[in-house]
Image (cartoon, helix red, strand yellow):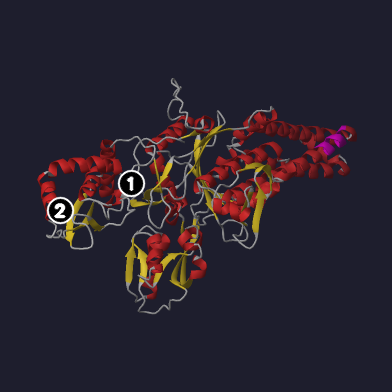
Amino acid sequence: MKTFYRKWRKSLYSMKIPFYLTILFYFGSYSFLVYNLLHLVGIETLIRYIIIGLFGIFGIIYLIVGCIKIIAKKRGLFTFLTILALIFSGIFGFASYAINKIINKIDSFTTSDTSTYTTVLLTLKDTEFTNNSTIGMVTDEEDRTGYILPLEWIQKEKIPNEIEYRSTSLELLEALYNKEVDAIFITKDYNILYSGEEKYTNIIEETKIVKEYSKTMKTEESELLATTKSLTEPFTVLVLGVDSESQNGLDANAAFNGDTLMLITFNPKTLIATMLSLPRDLYVPIISASGSNRGYAKINSSASGGTASTINTIENITGIEIDYFVKVNFRGVVDLVDALGGIDVDVEAPDYNYYIQSWGENRLCEQDSRRDFTNMICMDTGFQHLNGEQALAYARNRHGYLESDIARNRHQQQIIEAVAKKLVKNASLGEFEKLLDTIGNNIATNMKTSQILSFYQSIKGMLMNALSGEDFIKIQKMALQVHDLNIPGYSSLGYYDGSMQKISEAMKENLGLIEIKPTKTFSYDYSEDYEQSSSVIGKGIYTGRTLYTLPNFRGKSVSEAENFANTYHLNLSIEYQSDPNEIPGIILGQSVPEGTVTIKISEFTIYVNNVETSKEDPEENNEEEEKEENNTDTNEENNENTENDMPQIPGNPSTPEEDNDNNLENNEQIENSEE
């Protein structure tokens, strides 16, 4: 060792100094590379370790050979190895920078643990708020912006106003518009949540914010939606559409309007995905963030309870556990599609006559990405290349189609498929960083960086399929069979339990939760479009339990109301009123308005006309007496007629007995949830 040290001191400084600097540069950049490569969990593990091992060995060889050549004062091989080490060091530095930048961009996708929640005191434009004004507030003690913050605000500011309570924020808005209250506590994102309702389309112009109160709190997402599942095993993801108010992308904890709810399952081994779009008007039990049942309402109203409430609600009706959520800013769709150079989509022709008269039979027009009706985005129908604004306009449009929201869901699936194909097949390496910026600014998810990176193997499989000319991914489309609930003033949909069960079964098969059942029989209905119904899971299934609404009994017989009450296990009370202008024994009105969903009530009252007929017409009186004497026969005949007149949904083969059992079960569930 002393001999080596003595010879080293006598060696040339012109060789030692470059050697010192190269060793420092090489092992510094090498360490940085190793650090970043180890963070690429799940990505080519063997190759990463081989790279780490080979360049580690090269560093040791350069260290040993360099010392020997410096002592021997031979520059040839030393110079070559030094240049090679410097080149490798530069490559290490560039690769480390690129990897680190990608990881940081992926980190930006993830929702933060805390967020600022804001509640506002909202009034109508023409309302003057004073200390005597009545304020509306929700009863849900878990609602952060509807109950927790308002209560804290009332106590802190010692607000003296009288408080009235409603079950939901939507009921609060109704009370405000009906002037039952003068002001309401509601989330600052009320425009995003409720402007999609026809009644509140102009809610910004019709209301004003009196005061607002904000507080930074731990997010519900971080508390309730954490998961350790890897994307290398079958998983589920819920896509939520957001109309972000921000000009610089999407706030990770932004509210969403529930207009886009898409449940996707994906199996990385088979590269098969299922895709179900849930209509915003679907009438379902709303489950809060903590799991309590808040009663029936439209599914998009779950958005007021946050992401956790929406996830719990969808899990409840589908029976599918949701692993991840992804919030997507609608405006970001424009940037993403434009960054890809556009997408190819077969634009469906509108079929709503009023719309066609306005824009033309083969023309589709919609407001722009900022919902500006003065700047309409128009396109022809049929297969074509769409830019970002056109793609978003097509994904948003529902007014041109008789199926309305169902058609819009179908179009959104088309856009997602087209974007996915373009990403896998045509995105070049030069576009990759730009795409990451676009995606990072416009999505938020509960996926961790390591979980996102684990999706690499699936992407690799898709690329291999694309390069070999195969479909890069197989998508099983789904469509929940729905029907109009006919609730006055609101567009609400019920669904058939048989259709949902078929969809849930297919999703569980794709997730590997149940064995795939081979089809042993084949049936064909000549009245159905076979190609369409056979390729869309859940479509055309009208079996199983569904919801019914209370009909209008005015002008009908008592036996008809009794038959309805018996069928749906409702308690019926009869009160008598006198109206000489109406037929005796006929129903004059009812306590519960028509269109009320039977699952939400346990009883109702009918008001029957008890005015006697004129005694000047004895023949009519004799006829009435004969009818009373033969009451049994008449009731049997009325019951038969009533069964035929019951409000049945077309195509629903369920029997009254099945409906009795199903609705009894539903009423018991509601009673339990209320308790």
Q: Quadrant of residue 78?
A: top right
Q: Secondary structure at mark 1?
A: loop
Q: Which mark is drawn over residue 4?
A: none
Magenta span main SS: helix
Q: Which residue is mark 1?
A: 548
Q: CA distance from mark 1 to mark 2?
A: 38 Å
Examine the structure image and report whether residue 151 is included in the region drawn in magenta.
no
Does residue 107 appear left or right of residue 643 in this picture? right
Magenta-tinted stretch: 77-84
The location of residue 225, given as percent across then percent down, is: 45, 47
Examine the structure image and report whether residue 80 is included in the region drawn in magenta.
yes
- The N terminus: image quadrant: top right
Q: Quadrant of residue 75?
A: top right
Q: Quadrant of residue 343?
A: top right
From this view, report whether residue 50 is shown above or below residue 399. above
From this view, report whether residue 268 is shown above or below residue 408. above
The location of residue 494, given as percent across then percent down, is: 39, 45
Mark 1 or mark 2: name the one nearer the start of the chain: 1
Q: Which residue is mark 2?
A: 620
Q: Amino acid at mark 1?
A: Tyr
Name which residue lies at 86% across and 44% down.
13
Q: Is residue 665 visible?
A: yes
Of the pair 142 and 645, the residue shown nearer to us: 645
Numbered disc in front, either 1 or 2: 2
Name which residue lies at 23% across and 60% down.
582
The location of residue 558, given as percent across then percent down, is: 20, 50
Residues packed near mark 1 inside 10 Å, few (<14), some (14 to 19) or many (20 plus): many
Pointers 1 and 2 in contact (C-beta within 8 Å): no
Of the pair 537 and 70, the residue shown nearer to us: 537
Q: Secondary structure at mark 2?
A: helix
The location of residue 405, given as percent across then percent down, is: 50, 48
Does residue 192 appear left or right of residue 341 in this picture? left
